[in-house]
Image: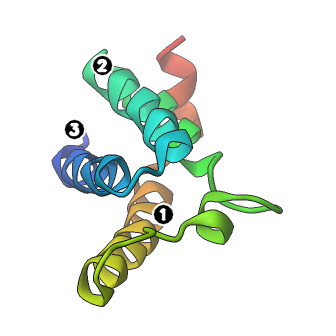
Amino acid sequence: MKTDYSEYQNILEEILELLRTYNEDHWANYFRKSLELLYKGKPQKSIAHTLGAYGGMGSFNDSLCFTGASEVVANRGFSLSNILYLECKSKRSIFKRALEF
């Protein structure tokens, strides 16, 4: 049975758009690579790459600020960050990732 990654893709695309709009260039470039891996048919590599942004000092959830965004937009961005993390954790499979090499 194939895993459906469409929700992961939608979240990634939406957060990437917000990051670009609010000049979060470093993280926009980081998640662009996750999206490229997904488009290349390597969803588990994409998920592993995305999860690499979370945790530790200076991580995505530590340094995200959406400078200049309205409170509603910023809250959506922070919410997407949490949703993206949870989606990745639910879809992560070390076995499937090994098959993508």
In this image, 48 relative to 74: left or right? right
In the image, residue 82 lies at what x, y percent? Answer: 45, 73
Q: How many marks?
A: 3
Residue 88 lies, with reference to residue 73, above or below; the image says above
Q: Secondary structure at mark 1?
A: helix
Q: Residue furthest right?
A: 57
Q: CA distance from mark 3 to mark 2?
A: 16 Å
Badge 3 local density, few (<14 within 10 Å), some, or many (20+)? few
User: At label 3, which amino acid type do we have?
Assistant: Met
In the image, residue 33 lies at what x, y percent? Answer: 45, 27
Q: Which residue is mark 1?
A: 85
- Picture quarter with the C terminus: top right
Q: Nearer the viewer, residue 33 or 40?
A: 33
Display coloring: rainbow
Q: Nearer the viewer, residue 77 or 43?
A: 77
User: At label 1, which amino acid type do we have?
Assistant: Tyr
Rendered image: mark on residue 41:
2
Q: Which residue is mark 3?
A: 1
